[in-house]
Image (cartoon, helix red, strand yellow):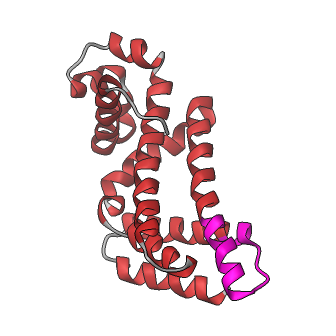
Amino acid sequence: MKPLSKAKLKLVEATIESLMEEGVDGCSVRKIAEKAQVSTGLINYHFGSIDNLIAAAYSYLAFTFLDSAIEASMKSEGDARQQLSAFIKEIFSGQVLQRRVLRAWVVFWGLIDSSPAIQSAQSDSNSSFTSYLEQLFMQLQELKGKQISPKMAALGLTALIDGLWLEMCLEEGAIKPLQCRKLCEHWVDSI
């Protein structure tokens, strides 16, 4: 994702905050502009439409989390397996696990069918997520000599991560981040 100007970033962050606080009710141009402390006209000026702003907010949130996990993975001084562990650990830490973050995602997902811009943001972020994991699984395949499909392994791990994340956000305390990490690690080791 290309960097945003200060003005655009302010609107994107206000959008995310608005959605986290109010869910779908936070989607209004007026509420977002109020939260950003700007005039409503700046939304159209910078993004052309509320859909484009919400799509930018989707991308920003998704790539913030993904970039953080990739950075943790790359800082890992080990092989592909250790990089996967670092990625998994980062995914199940911090802000990602907050219920209010889920509130924003629910709004984003609810708008996918009606907004090509949001649909594109979802497709781009999901593709980037699975592509990075697929690269690690390709390296892991080379290291272990196993005959696995890196694409299917990446999709499987993505589905497991998404499901565990939803469980954690929907019922706080039902499952702990460490349990989620262990489940993912076990799954990776079993393929």
Q: Quadrant of the C terminus?
A: bottom right
- Quadrant of residue 23 in the image? top left
Residue 7 makes an appearance in the image:
yes
Image coords of residue 35 (percent x, y): 22, 28
Q: Is residue 44 magenta?
A: no
Q: Is residue 146 magenta?
A: yes
**Going 57% across and 57% down the picture, which residue do you hit?**
129
- Which residues, given as a range, are shown in magenta? 133-153
Image side of residue 88 versus residue 121, left or right: left
Image coords of residue 189 (percent x, y): 60, 88
Image coords of residue 54 (percent x, y): 45, 32
**Going 65% across and 68% down the picture, which residue do you hit?**
154
By secondary structure, the bulk of the magenta-drawn segment is best described as: helix
Residue 115 makes an appearance in the image:
no
Along the line of sight, the residue nearer the viewer: 32 or 63: 63
Image side of residue 129 versus residue 150, left or right: left
Along the line of sight, the residue nearer the viewer: 113 or 64: 64
- Quadrant of residue 178 in the image? bottom left
Give the farthest residue toward the left: 37
Q: Is residue 121 above or below residue 46?
A: below
Q: Is residue 12 above or below residue 85?
A: above
Image side of residue 126 versus residue 58, left or right: right
